Amino acid sequence: MTVVFVRGGIEFDSGVCLRGLNLLAHAQMIELPTGSRCGGHGKCGADRVILDPESQKQVNPPSPIERHQLSPEELSRGLRLACQTFPGADGLSIRVLLDSTIEWTGEGQSG
Ligand code: FES
């Protein structure tokens, strides 16, 4: 199982899903840009991603930093900051949409 990032309908598979590694680090492992401008310190808010509903259940709850950076409506849509989001266990299957302006529509997301 692994973290799969989706951008423009193209899937980018990180190859692993590690509990101690946030989603930003998973993306960086495969040199996939996320828009991060603060080095993963939760300050820029530029690494916004959307998790599909199943994946939302497999990561940590939103951190205080995310509750400050994201509105309740955005959080309810599945938006997260990649640098603040950690898989709940090793080996999960997590899908992450990189363009946070697009609603997640499920399987076959075409961007
Ligand atoms: S990288 Fe800046 S908030 Fe996540």
Image: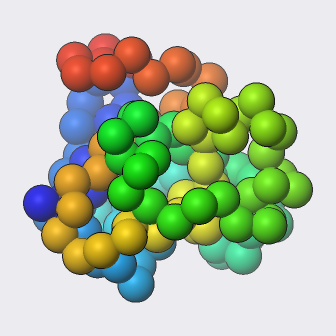
Q: For residue 54, what is the image quadrant?
A: top left
Q: Please give the name of the residue rendered at 45% of the width and 23% of the height, measured from the top-left corner.
A: 104
**78 left or right of 107 in image:** right
Which quarter of the figure has residue 19?
bottom left
Residue 74 seen in the figure? yes
Residue 63 at x, y percent in the picture: 70, 66
Asked if residue 36 can be seen in this view, the reply is no
Residue in front for this viewpoint, 58 or 68: 58
Q: Is 59 located above or below residue 57 in the figure?
A: below
Q: How many marks?
A: 0
Work out whether 80 lies above or below 37. above
Q: Is residue 34 above or below residue 91?
A: above
Q: Residue at x 12, y 60 (%)?
A: 1
Compare residues 11 and 63 and report the one nearer the observer. Answer: 63
Question: Is 37 placed left or right of 109 in the picture?
Answer: right
Position of residue 2 in the picture relative to residue 22 (left or right) = left
Q: Residue 21, image x and y in percent?
A: 41, 78
- In this view, the residue farthest toward the bottom is 20
* Viewport quadrant of the C terminus: top left
* Relative image position of residue 82 (x, y in whole percent): 55, 58
